[in-house]
Image (cartoon, grey):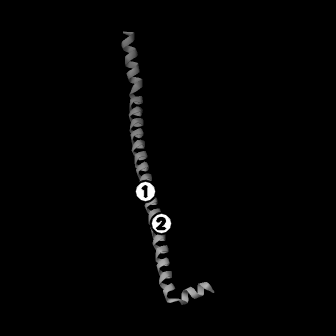
Amino acid sequence: MHGLRLYQNPGSSVLFASMLCALLSTSVSLLSQKQRDLENRLDKSVLKCREAEHIQKTYQQIKMKLEDEQKSFENTLDGMELDIVK
């Protein structure tokens, strides 16, 4: 019954509205903070992904270079052996 009297009292309506606004403001503030935290985590993840892609590209280039060197390695080695024999 006490809660019922709270709504019946005109001054209490203002107090209730004020409390409700404060609660909503706090909720919005907490949600905004959570959104900023999630956005920051997303940004960090995107940066890490880009860095990983860059590293992967670098290793692919190294691999291609080594594969190209491997193709001519036998001929180079054979040539060096011939030079030693002479």
Amino acid type of disc 1?
Asn
Measuring 49% from the left and 86% from the top, which residue is drawn there? 11
> Residue 33, percent across and down?
45, 63
Q: For the residues marked 2 and 1, what is the alpha-carbon distance in whole angstroms?
A: 15 Å
Q: Nearer the viewer, residue 41 or 50?
A: 41
Up the image or down, 67 lies above or below 34; here it is: above
Measuring 59% from the left and 84% from the top, which residue is drawn there? 3
> Residue 32, percent across and down?
44, 66
Measuring 38% from the left and 11% from the top, which residue is drawn there? 84
Q: Nearer the viewer, residue 52 or 41?
A: 41
For label 2, the crowd category at 10 Å Cα-Cα, with few meaning under 14, some 14 to 19 and many 20 or more, is: few
For label 1, the crowd category at 10 Å Cα-Cα, with few meaning under 14, some 14 to 19 and many 20 or more, is: few
Q: Quadrant of the N terminus?
A: bottom right
Look at the numbered disc 1 and give the secondary structure of its residue.
helix
Measuring 45% from the left and 59% from the top, which residue is drawn there? 37
Q: Which residue is mark 1?
A: 40
> Residue 20, percent across and down?
49, 78
Instruction: Give yes or no for contact between labels 2 and 1 (Cβ–Cβ under 8 Å).
Output: no
Q: Nearer the viewer, mark 2 or mark 1?
A: 2
In terms of sequence position, does the residue under pointer 2 or pointer 1 come before the other? Answer: 2
Q: Could you say which quadrant of the image residue 54 lies in?
A: top left
Q: Farthest top residue?
A: 86
Q: Which residue is mark 2?
A: 30
- Residue 84 tag number: none
Up the image or down, 52 lies above or below 39; here it is: above
Number of marks in picture: 2
Amino acid type of disc 2?
Leu
Q: Quadrant of the C terminus?
A: top left
Look at the numbered disc 2 and give the secondary structure of its residue.
helix
Up the image or down, 61 lies above or below 37; here it is: above
